[in-house]
Amino acid sequence: MIIREEESGLTGLSTALRYRAEDNTLLLLHSVLPAHSPPPHYLLKDDGKSGGAGRSTTPMLILFWQPPGVSNRCKTIMAQKHTKPNFSVSQAKDVVKRLFRLTASEIRSLPSYGDQNLYVAVVEGGEYVLKIMDSEDSKNQTLVEVQTIAMSLLQQNGLPAQTALPTTSGQLMSLEKMDCGYGCQKYLVRLLTYLPGITISKAPLTPQLLYETGKTAARMDQILQELQHPHLSVLQREKFIWSLSSVPLLEEYLNVFDGDPLQEVVKDVIHQYKTTLVPKRSNFRKCINHGDFNDLNILVQPDETDGYRISGILDFGDMNTGYYIHELAINITHMMKEHPEPVEVGGPVLAGWESVIPLNEAERDRLYLLVLSRLCQLLVLSRYTVKLHPENAEYLMITSKRGVHILRHLWELGKEKVEKVWFQSAAQFSH
């Protein structure tokens, strides 16, 4: 057996051992660990059996280094090329027929990142989305079940969320074995109702539409408090890197800013979070968060006043137990990315939110810092992902460049000036 050492494309995140059967080579794929890394923890993963014409049938074992605090979502980023589903049209048609007794007349791809989303029109009448989870997230069926039930709860209470069509056996999802080109793996499959509309990122963000996003976000979190399930504890995702409770975990990834002056801003935001927000967090009101109420997860349609109304709420994959103020901060942050004058976004969104859930003093005082913290999450993790997957660099860096401008602008204006704009605008909007 040949033993050869190579530098992996997983720079800064993982080390892997691979056995390549075709030339009997053991590859040691290595990477540079972040500065001051603690002793590594390892995950042994079986990459499945390849099979098929021209491919080895030898299992590939990968040893991943897992930094402390890395959530399932980050582990998915590590191994994404081996976990993302890629069902063919014929495979998708077979799944729809076998699980739901429906005959697909049209199937086409919809935008997605980790999962696979397919638009499905059926002969029997109706439009659906066949949502196929990546193989990593498919391992947590309980979490996906809770998310699916949450979607139904919102729909039952008048919010435009997707619902899952039960399979012929009455289940909300099915775990399907499929070979997508890198061995047979298991994927959770759901058939969700199709919601019409365009993403809010493509619509003009009028003050009224921004008001409606804030109001909808608050109403959504309010309804989610009624969610019942014997395993709601799965939403307590302590090390979930995208939760606004996990901002200090970003320190593990600050090397992505080495040589960039923005690194000091991000460090200062994290320091302020740890020293001024964490001690006051007991004054925040707890709730269940959607966690990613952003410009690509909100659908809108034209209304009768030549404006737009919200027609869909998508992607519940980041649901977690958090705080009301987190949802508001996330919503403001992502709406800023789509507005020519980012600071002006906060007032209308805040007014819409407070028409349902008025903020308490502690929440109002930390809103600015939480928006900065969300911007830091977006910038740090998008740059980190680019290092892992340079083929996605163009898509990821569009958001990153806009985020850099907004973070610098808010930081330079300072808390007092930004809050004055937000709170005065919200008060005027309310009247």
Image (cartoon, rainbow, N blue to C red):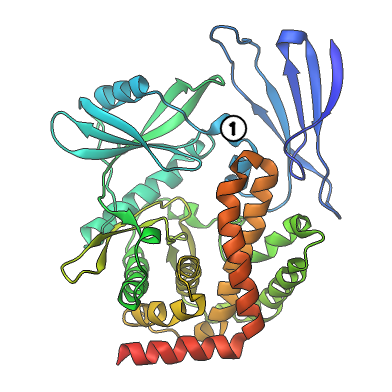
Secondary-structure class at tag 1? helix
Pinpoint residue 217: horizontal percent, then vertical percent: 37, 68
Q: Residue at x 61, y 69 (%)?
A: 405
Give the quadrant of residue 417.
bottom right
Image position of 429 with respect to 28: above or below: below
The answer to whether 286 appears left or right of 314 in the picture is right
Which residue is at the front of the view, 426 or 49?
Answer: 426
Image position of 385 with respect to 419: above or below: above
Give the quadrant of residue 105.
top left
Pinpoint residue 57: horizontal percent, then vertical percent: 61, 10
Answer yes or no: is residue 287 visible.
Answer: yes
Image position of 217 with respect to 106: above or below: below
Q: Residue at x 63, y 60 (%)?
A: 379
Give the quadrant of residue 3.
top right
The answer to whether 300 appears left or right of 123 in the picture is right
Q: Which amino acid is tagged 1?
A: Lys
Pinpoint residue 73: horizontal percent, then vertical percent: 57, 47
Give the quadrant of the C terminus.
bottom left
Image position of 268 with respect to 135: above or below: below
Which residue is at the front of the view, 163 or 229?
Answer: 163
Give the quadrant of the N terminus.
top right
Which residue is at the front of the view, 249 or 197?
Answer: 197
Q: Residue at x 32, y 89 (%)?
A: 430
Residue beneath label 1, please? 81
